[in-house]
Image: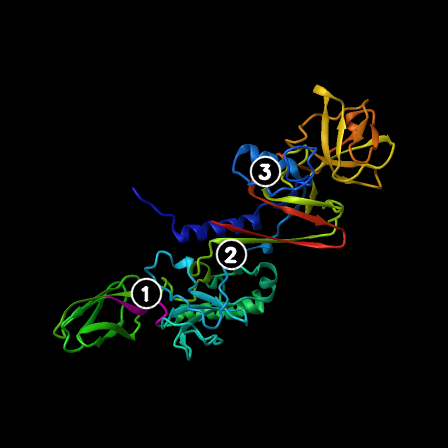
C-alpha cells in the first residue's frame, strides 16, 4: 500500500498556521541562558543539543523559557526556496507531470525582486534576465519563456526574504467587488499583484496547454503526421515537427482553454508509434495563485526583540532556545495570555544580601534532600529581585525561607523574606500551559538593551 501527502494539503497546513497566528495567541519564546552542557559545573558551550519531539524534551524547553513576545498577523508569511536568477544558470520548465517539480528551480527572483515561473527552457543556461510584467508567458532573447507572477514588496522583503527563502502570497481576487474596492483596501504592491492575478485568470488561454513533450519519436514518417488533442478542455491545436522519419517535437498553434486533462494522438504521415504528452497549466491558469503554484508549504515567522520590551525581555544575558507557544495562560489563571510581551521567570526577593548576585551564576540553598538550585537569568537592580530558571541540570528543588541562598560565582548570600508570598515572585505566564508547536536549539545569542534581535523561523509543512 502506497500513499502521498499532496502539495495542496501541505499548502493548506501552512495557510492554517498563518491563520492561527492571526486569530490565536501565539508567542515566540526565548530561553536557556545556561550553557549547552550536562552539569551545573560545566559552563562551556558544546554544540547545541538536538531537540526531540518527546515529552521530556518539550518540558525541558518550557522550563528554560524566560521571555515571550506575541506574534501579530503580519509576522508570518508563506515562503518558498529562493532561486535568484543568475546568468548562465539552467532552469527547469514547469511540468504538470513532474512529481519533484517543487524541489527544482522552475521559478526565479530577479534583481528587481520580480518573480517569474519558467514555462519553457531551450535546455541551455539563461542569459537574459526577465523584466516584463505581461499577462501572457513571454519569450526572452535566450529563448526562455517566463510567466510574470508578482513582485516582492519592500515590507515583505525586509521581514521574510533571506538568502535561502523568499516570500510568496496570493491575493484573494474574488473577495473584492471591483478594482476600486481592491485599490482602496490593498497596498500599492498588493494591488499590482491583484491586477496581475485577475488578468491571468481572465486570459483566454490561461488554462491552456503550454507545450508538449515527445515521449517516443516513432518510425517511418515520410510527412508530418496530424496531432489530435482530446480531453477536458477546448481549442488546443498543435503540429508535429519531424527530423527525417522521426517525430521530434510538437508545436503549439493554439493553447486552448480550461484543460484539466489532455490526451494526444499522433496519426498519419506514413509512420507509427510516435507518442507525446501535454503539459497543462494549473487549474485556473499560471499566475492566478502563486502560493499553490510555487509550492508555498513553507512558513516564515519574523519578529524583532527590541530592548527590554517594557522590562519583560531580559537583557544582559543570552539565549539558546527559540520556541513557539500557542495559547499559554496568565500565571495562576485559565485565561489565555494576550499581552504583547511576558516575563516567564519567577524571582526571589531577599531581606538582605551580602553583595550582588551575578547573571548566569548558579545559586544554591540547603543540602541533600533539601537542596534547591537555579541559574540566575536576571537581577533587577531597582527591586533586588533575582530571576531564575531551573532545569534538569539544577533539579527542581523548592526555595524556602529561613535558609541563606548563595551565589557560586559572586559569593553573594541572601536571606529570603519571611514567607513564600513575600520572597517568591510569580512570573507573568504559566510556562507549563499552552502548546509548544516549534522548538529550535541555537548557539548563544547575546541580548543587550541597545541592540535588536531579528528572529526568523522557517517551518516546512
Question: In the image shown, does 383 or 17 lie closer to the viewer?
Answer: 383
Label 2, label 3: how many angstroms apart (C-alpha)?
Answer: 24 Å
Label 1, label 3: how many angstroms apart (C-alpha)?
Answer: 45 Å
Residue 434 pos. (x, y %): 59, 38
Residue 59 pos. (x, y %): 59, 34
Residue 273 pos. (x, y %): 16, 66
Label 1, label 2: how many angstroms apart (C-alpha)?
Answer: 25 Å
Q: Can residue 325 be seen?
A: yes
Whichever of callouts 1 and 3 sits on the residue coming sooner in the sequence is 1
Residue 45 pos. (x, y %): 66, 42
Which of the numbered marks, if any, corresponds to residue 434? 3
**Viewport quadrant of the N terminus:** top left
SS at mark 3 in the image: loop
Q: How many marks?
A: 3
Q: Is residue 26 left or right of residue 364?
A: left
Q: Can residue 137 be seen?
A: no
Which of the numbered marks, if any, corresponds to residue 78? 2
Residue drawn 30% across and 71% down?
Answer: 256
Magenta-tinted stretch: 205-215
Amino acid at each position: 500500500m502506497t500513499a502521498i501527502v499532496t502539495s495542496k494539503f501541505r499548502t493548506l497546513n501552512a495557510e492554517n498556521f498563518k491563520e492561527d497566528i492571526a486569530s490565536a495567541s501565539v508567542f515566540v519564546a526565548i530561553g536557556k541562558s545556561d550553557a549547552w552542557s550536562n552539569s551545573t559545573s560545566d559552563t562551556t558551550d558544546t554544540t547545541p543539543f538536538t531537540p526531540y519531539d518527546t515529552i521530556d524534551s518539550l518540558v525541558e524547553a518550557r522550563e528554560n523559557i524566560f521571555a515571550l513576545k506575541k506574534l501579530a498577523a503580519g509576522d508570518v508569511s508563506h515562503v518558498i526556496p529562493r532561486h535568484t536568477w543568475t546568468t548562465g544558470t539552467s532552469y527547469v520548465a514547469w511540468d504538470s507531470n513532474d512529481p519533484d517539480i517543487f524541489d527544482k528551480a522552475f521559478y526565479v527572483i530577479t534583481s528587481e525582486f520580480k518573480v517569474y515561473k519558467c514555462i519553457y527552457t531551450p535546455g541551455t543556461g539563461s542569459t537574459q534576465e526577465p523584466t516584463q510584467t505581461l499577462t501572457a508567458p513571454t519569450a526572452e532573447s535566450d529563448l526562455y519563456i517566463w510567466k510574470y507572477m508578482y513582485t516582492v514588496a519592500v515590507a515583505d522583503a525586509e521581514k521574510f526574504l533571506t538568502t535561502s527563502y523568499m516570500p510568496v502570497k496570493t491575493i484573494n481576487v474574488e473577495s473584492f467587488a471591483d478594482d476600486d474596492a481592491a485599490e482602496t483596501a490593498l497596498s500599492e504592491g498588493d494591488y499590482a499583484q491583484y491586477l496581475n492575478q485577475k488578468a491571468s485568470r481572465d486570459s483566454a488561454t490561461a488554462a491552456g496547454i503550454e507545450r508538449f513533450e515527445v515521449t517516443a519519436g516513432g518510425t517511418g514518417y515520410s510527412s508530418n503526421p496530424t496531432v489530435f488533442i482530446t480531453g477536458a478542455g477546448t481549442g488546443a491545436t498543435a503540429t508535429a515537427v519531424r527530423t527525417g522519419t522521426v517525430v521530434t517535437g510538437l508545436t503549439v498553434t493554439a493553447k486552448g482553454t480550461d484543460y484539466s486533462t489532455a490526451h494526444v494522438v499522433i496519426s498519419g504521415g506514413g509512420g507509427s508509434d510516435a507518442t507525446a504528452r501535454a503539459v497543462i497549466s494549473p487549474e485556473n491558469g499560471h499566475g492566478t495563485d502563486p502560493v499553490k503554484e510555487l509550492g508555498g508549504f513553507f512558513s516564515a515567522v519574523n519578529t524583532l526583540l527590541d530592548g527590554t520590551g517594557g522590562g519583560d525581555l531580559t537583557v544582559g544575558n543570552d539565549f539558546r532556545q527559540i520556541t513557539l507557544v500557542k495559547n499559554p495562560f496568565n500565571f495562576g489563571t485559565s485565561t489565555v495570555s494576550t499581552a504583547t510581551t511576558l516575563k516567564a521567570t519567577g524571582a526571589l526577593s531577599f531581606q538582605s544580601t551580602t553583595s550582588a548576585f551575578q547573571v548566569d551564576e548558579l545559586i544554591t540553598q540547603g543540602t541533600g534532600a533539601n537542596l534547591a538550585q537555579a541559574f540566575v537569568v536576571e537581577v533587577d537592580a531597582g527591586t533586588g529581585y533575582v530571576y531564575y530558571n531551573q532545569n534538569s541540570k539544577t533539579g527542581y528543588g523548592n526555595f524556602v525561607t529561613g535558609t541563606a541562598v548563595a551565589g557560586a560565582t559572586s559569593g553573594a548570600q541572601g536571606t529570603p523574606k519571611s514567607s513564600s508570598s513575600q520572597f517568591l515572585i510569580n512570573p507573568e505566564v504559566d510556562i507549563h500551559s499552552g502548546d509548544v508547536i516549534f522548538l529550535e536549539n541555537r548557539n548563544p545569542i547575546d541580548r543587550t538593551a541597545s541592540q535588536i534581535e531579528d528572529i526568523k523561523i522557517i517551518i516546512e509543512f
